[in-house]
Image: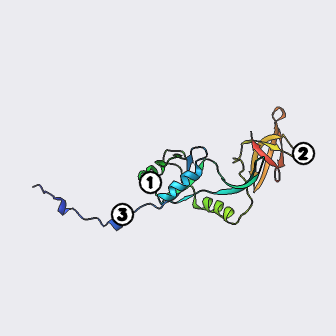
Amino acid sequence: MSASYQIADWPQIDPGLLITPPPKWYAVQTRSRHEKLVAYQLQIRSIEHYLPVATQVHRWSDRRKRVEVPLFSGYVFVRVVPNNQERVRVLRINGAVRFIGNSAEGTPIPDQEIEGVRMLIEHNIPCATYPFLKVGQRIRIRGGALDGLEGIFQSRNGEETLVVSVDAIQRSLSVSIRGYHIEVV
């Protein structure tokens, strides 16, 4: 004995029960010098976004002017539901290149990281971009008595240090880099 089912017999699903994942922050790479254009287009399309800017004084031969420049050149942050439809809406914007991350979908950015940047900007705390450092990365000190010194970046108990090694004798020295300007080698 076989039963036949019709669509009318199927259980009805309440649309309110469908769970939509919460929106998450993502970094979107933009074409060079298109950050403000992308942010403007995101605003027009009512897509939540954040473009942190810093005010700088630019000098020309005949004048000086205060200019707002993106704090992270080449990037705009968007807060969208993590699904293909939302990603396509963002990527169709003129100047948007790709979501940043390990996969094509992008890697979500924790809310507290975006809020930390917002807090610095909203309170007008002087800040500047700084090279992103990972423990174990090779760095060089710029300026001061240790100008040009190279070594490996280390961090222990909140203390950032430069480790200088002499491979031949397998010995190392560690020096605090607090207060020094450094660059990635």
Percent coordinates x, y for residue 83 in the rendering? 43, 53
Q: Residue at x 11, y 55 (%)?
A: 2
Q: Amino acid at mark 3?
A: Leu
- Picture disc at residue 95: none
Rendering quarter of residue 86? bottom left
> Which residue shows up at 73% across the image and 54% down it?
65
Pick the residue in front: 77 or 100.
77
Give the residue at mark 2: 145
Q: Dot 3 lies on which element?
A: loop
Residue occupying the far left of the picture: 1
Q: Amino acid at mark 2?
A: Ala
Q: What is the image's colouring?
A: rainbow
In the rendered image, residue 94, in percent from the top left (x then y), is placed at: 50, 47
Spatial CA span between label 2 and label 1: 52 Å
Between disc 1 and disc 3, the foreground one is: 1
Q: Say if 109 sits above or below 74 in the image.
A: below
Q: Residues within 10 Å of mark 2 (few under 14, many from 20)?
A: few
Q: Position of residue 21 (x, y in %)?
A: 44, 60
* Sequence-wise first label, 2 or 1: 1
| Residue drawn where x is 85% and y is 45% of the image | 143
Circle 1 SS class: helix
Whether pointer 1 and pointer 3 mark residues with C-beta atoms closer than 8 Å, the reply is no
What's the CA distance linking mark 1 and mark 3? Answer: 17 Å
Q: Which numbered circle lies on residue 86?
A: 1
How many numbered marks does the figure carry?
3
For label 3, the residue is 18
What is the crowding at mark 1: few (fewer than 14 residues within 10 Å), some, or many (at least 20)? some
